[in-house]
Amino acid sequence: MAEYNPKSLKAEEFINHEEIMETLAYAEEHKNDIPLIESILEKARPVKTENGCKCAGLTHREASVLLACEDPEVIKKIYEIAEEIKMAFYGNRIVLFAPLYLSNYCVNGCLYCPYHLKNKHIARKKLTQEEVRQEVIALQDMGHKRLAIEAGEDPKMNPIEYILECINTIYGVHHKNGDIRRVNVNIAATTVENYKKLKDAGIGTYILFQETYHKESYLTLHPTGPKHDYDYHTEAMDRAMEGGIDDVGLGVLFGLDKYKYEFAGLIMHAEHLEAVHGVGPHTISVPRVKKADDIDPDAFDNGIEDETFIKIAACIRLAVPYTGMIVSTRENEAVRTKMLRVGVSQVSGGSRTSVGGYAGYTPEERPHDTEQFDVSDQRSLDEVVRWLMENGHIPSFCTACYREGRTGDRFMSLCKNGQILNCCHPNALMTLTEYLVDYASPATKEIGYRMVEQELKRIPKDKVREIAAQHIEDIKNSNSRDFRF
């Protein structure tokens, strides 16, 4: 029997089944232990320092106790502290991105994904480089600056050379005032050598969803194909970091197995990366199983209600305070509104989950023949931007940290030292202004310019505030773009 060891490079030791089961038993035993819970909440709360704030975070066991607690007053405190942490380290900014599906050819047999090999009636498609270019132009015309590219696992149809060629094409498209400044990559687990190639290609974050940390369930849900190898998949982030990628993104697909088990495994994975590499995940995504071509989410009996889902997000924020959190258009507007308050820092907008879903379609049109899953939030990017501002959030298209080399522990240092208001805040305002000038509807421009003017006043350093204000005027009055701190 493997022993739990967060510093191990073996999946069965850093995501240890016995440790998770003991953690869940401990959480169940102590879920009504109010003195213990109060001490955990106090530990999670941000502490003000000379340079801003700091947070201790929580262990997977402490966080699991909070998740197990059903006391309404405790849950209320969890949400309050989650929002306090979110504001302390990320402010009221919300980063925007869009997925770009390159190919749905796949050799795996995943039971929850319509791209699985046995699905013979879904249309199979792989974008040519010219089609990639047209998709990028369509995304730039919407106003996007950051993409997450997606592709099925197929060594013949989607080799690493194809992915690298697509990245090169994406970065090479300069249309009007549009540029994709950051390409995040969500592709199958691969080798250290291939991760080095992705790093050299200039990617931002490497994202890989674990799907489920429960090994027995994982093997059942992935009956065929290379993804069946649980250990190889679970150890992918270590290979990515060995390959030089220091920004990695974790995630599970909630609904495949019991959510408390998945939650504990997710936090343990973050602890493992911190223990081995000195920096935890750059982002954590929280998707839920959704309806798709030949996939019925009701076939999985571990679905979770909205309130439980929101509570999971809040507990993640308390456990890993410096990590970005992503919620996609899998979720509807009402759920996303609540998730923003308890810790989410990135959302997708105007998303299409089809291969070739952007070029040639109006914002109202939505192709379904190659969709990976149903999109619940079908609003345009402009509507999402306006919604964020109406709820007090600054829509940010910023990619400055990645392009200035502030990744991995350097980004975490910036976050921990409280420099958000002097760095990320003005960058958000400048990129929002770019969006308002180049792409926004009149209604969005009106609320946006008002927000920019108000939020400029919140920048603490006089010099930074003055420079940001000048850059914003330059953006409004010329084609000058891409200013950054």
Image (cartoon, helix red, strand yellow):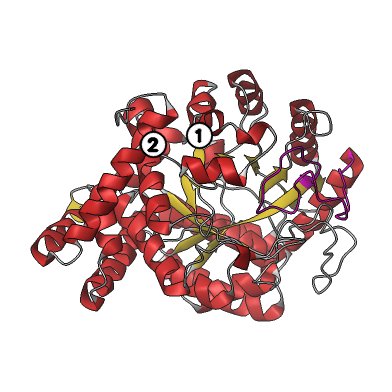
Q: Is residue 94 visible?
A: yes
| Disc with the residue nearer the chain's start (2 vs 1) | 2
Q: Is residue 109 left or right of residue 46?
A: right
The answer to which quarter of the image holds residue 297 is bottom right
Main secondary structure found in the magenta portion: loop
Observer-nearest of 30 and 363: 30
Q: Is residue 329 visible?
A: no
Apparent side of residue 461 relative to residue 385 in the rendered image (left or right): left
Disc 2 element:
loop
Task: Check if residue 449 falls in the magenta segment.
Answer: no
Could you give the CA–CA distance between mark 2 and mark 1, rounded to whole angstroms? Answer: 9 Å
Residue 15, numbered circle: 2
Where in the figure is residue 281, as x and y percent of width and height? 44, 40
Left or right placement of residue 257 versus residue 191 in this view = left
Q: Which residues are magenta?
A: 102-128
Label 2–label 1 contact, CB within 8 A: yes
Q: Which amino acid is tagged 2?
A: Ile
Q: Which image quarter is the N terminus in?
A: top left
Residue 240: image location, x then y, percent: 54, 27
Name the element at disc 1. Answer: helix
Which residue is label 1 attached to? 234
Quadrant of the rendered structure where residue 28 is?
Answer: bottom left
> Looking at the image, is 365 positioned above or below residue 256?
below
